[in-house]
Image (spheres, rainbow, N blue to C red):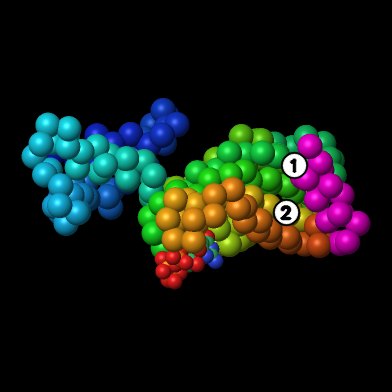
Amino acid sequence: MSHTADDIPIPGGTTDEEISMTPVLYDAERAERAVRELLLAVGEDPDRDGLRETPARVARAYAELFAGLYQDPADVLKVTFDIGGHDEMILVKDIEVYSTCEHHLVPFHGVAHVGYIPGEDGRVTGLSKLARLVDVFARRPQVQERLTTQIADTLVEVLRPQGVIVVLQCEHLCMSMRGVRKPGSNTLTSAVRGQMRDAATRAEAMSLILGR
Ligand SMILES: Nc1nc2c(ncn2[C@@H]2O[C@H](COP(=O)(O)OP(=O)(O)OP(=O)(O)O)[C@@H](O)[C@H]2O)c(=O)[nH]1
Ligand SMILES: [Zn+2]
């Protein structure tokens, strides 16, 4: 069975606009061929019963895992509201993150905390859009540092806020299930911009983030 890019749905996408973000560059047939090759390379029989549909399944799975490559992060933040002069921190904590380590193509997962202080115009974005922004960058081959920076820099560019803080805490399966084999270790990364760099503001944000 062969799947074209057109029949691969974008997760969470239901509107015409979201569906139009179907990954035009994604070559599902090429991905299928590559997975079949990989199975042969490890000495498996890709034509045995359990594996026959696997290359097509994996090709579909990769389309989903890397859907962020075909999405414009700025689109996610297009909807803004004027909520009447709220110039204090807005923080969404514990956003679940699943991404793919670009070194080994295995998952890293954990949580993201995203906070910002609205700009002078007092406009804010929808809370869910912060989580959508995390997903756009997480659904790409990634390293955790770049994922953290990209989320922060997009917020700065699009919302023009007074400050931004992004903190990610993830376990990398490339460190757990292979290689150094240290399950349970967590990597923390942060990106802090604008007024959020101010020592007191940063301390307040970190205590909100780390306080359980
Ligand atoms: N900085 C950074 N490193 C990462 C990330 N994900 C994986 N790595 C690391 O990338 C490195 C790749 O190292 P290499 O020596 O080229 O690859 P390797 O022989 O598979 O390394 P080991 O994982 O130590 O077995 C490893 O140290 C990984 O832990 C990430 O998000 N950020
Ligand atoms: Zn890795």
Q: What residue type is labelled 1?
A: Leu
Q: Where is residue 141 in the image (x, y as percent from the top left)?
A: 42, 56
The x, y position of residue 205, in whole percent, is: 81, 49
Left or right, 26 with respect to 192, comes to left
Q: Which residue is drawn at 27% across and 50% down?
A: 26
Looking at the image, tell me whether mark 1 or mark 2 is earlier in sequence order: 1
Q: What residue type is labelled 2?
A: Ile
Q: Which of 181 and 102 is in front in this view?
A: 181
Q: At x 68% / y 45%, what residue is drawn?
A: 113
**In x, y percent, where is residue 30?**
18, 52
Residue furthest to the top in view is 14
Tell me residue 130's x, y (percent).
62, 42
Tell me how far mark 1 sits from mark 2, CA to CA: 9 Å
Q: Residue at x 55, y 58 (%)?
A: 144
Q: Is residue 134 visible?
A: no
**Pointer 2 residue:** 165
Residue range of the region highlighted in magenta in the rendering: 198-212
Q: In which quarter of the image is the N terminus?
A: top left
Can the viewer see residue 84 in this picture?
yes
Residue pushed farthest right? 200
Q: Name the residue under label 1.
A: 91
Relative vertical location of residue 160 with respect to residue 128 in this rendering, above or below: below
Q: Is the magenta stretch mostly helix, strand or loop?
A: helix
Tag 1, which secondary structure? Answer: strand
Asked if the stretch drawn in magenta spans residue 203, the answer is yes
Residue 60 placement, left or right of 138: left
Are circles 1 and 2 on residues that touch, CB within 8 Å?
Answer: yes
